[in-house]
């Protein structure tokens, strides 16, 4: 089963399996999603979860604060969709 991930910055919707981080699926689909480390340490892929639910893989202590989590922020490289989701990237990473 896959979930639909809509990336508001591009207006594109991609399919993402629940065991794959959103960032990895987006890059594989050719979307120029901002990131640097892709491992949860730099916060370059910080995004806002507009709708839906994700599960977060472990990440670096400084990458995403409790306050940011409470505001609906996620790290796309560590967020796996649990439902159809819509995200908007806030980061300005480079590849």
Image (cartoon, helix red, strand yellow):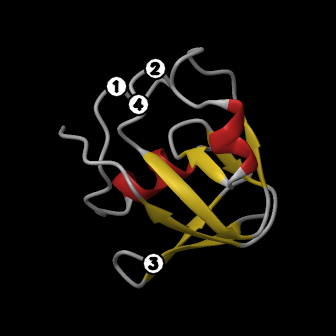
How far apart in space, not on screen, are marks 1 and 4 (Cα)? 4 Å
Residues at badges 1 and 4 in contact (C-beta under 8 Å)? Answer: yes
The outermost residue toward the top is: 61
Above or below, comparing residue 59 to residue 30 in the picture: above
- Mark 4, secondary structure of its residue: loop
Residue identifier under label 2: 41
Tell me the residue that label 4 is attached to. Answer: 38
Q: Is residue 65 visible?
A: yes
Determine the secondary structure under disc 3: loop
* Residue, disc 3: 8
Tag 4 and tag 2, C-beta contact below 8 Å: no
Disc 4 and disc 2: Cα gap in Å?
8 Å
Q: Residues within 10 Å of mark 3 (few under 14, many from 20)?
A: some
Q: Quadrant of the N terminus?
A: bottom right
Measured as percent of width and height from the top left, residue 22 is found at 55, 52
Marks 1 and 2, Cα distance to the nearest angstrom? 7 Å
> Which badge, 3 or 2, is on the more N-terminal residue?
3
Q: Secondary structure at mark 1?
A: loop
CA gap between label 1 and label 3 equals 22 Å
Q: Tell me: residue 72, above or below residue 7.
A: above
In screen coordinates, is 20 left or right of 27?
A: right
């Amino acid at each position: 089963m896959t979930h639909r991930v809509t990336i508001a910055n591009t207006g594109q919707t991609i399919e993402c399996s629940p065991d794959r981080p959103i960032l990895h699926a987006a890059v594989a689909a050719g979307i120029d999603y901002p990131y640097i480390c892709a491992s949860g340490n730099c916060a370059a892929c910080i995004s806002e979860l507009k709708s839906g639910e994700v599960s977060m893989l472990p990440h670096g202590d400084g990458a995403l604060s409790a306050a940011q989590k409470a505001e609906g922020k996620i790290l796309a490289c560590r967020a796996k969709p649990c439902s159809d989701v819509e995200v908007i990237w806030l980061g300005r990473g480079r590849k």
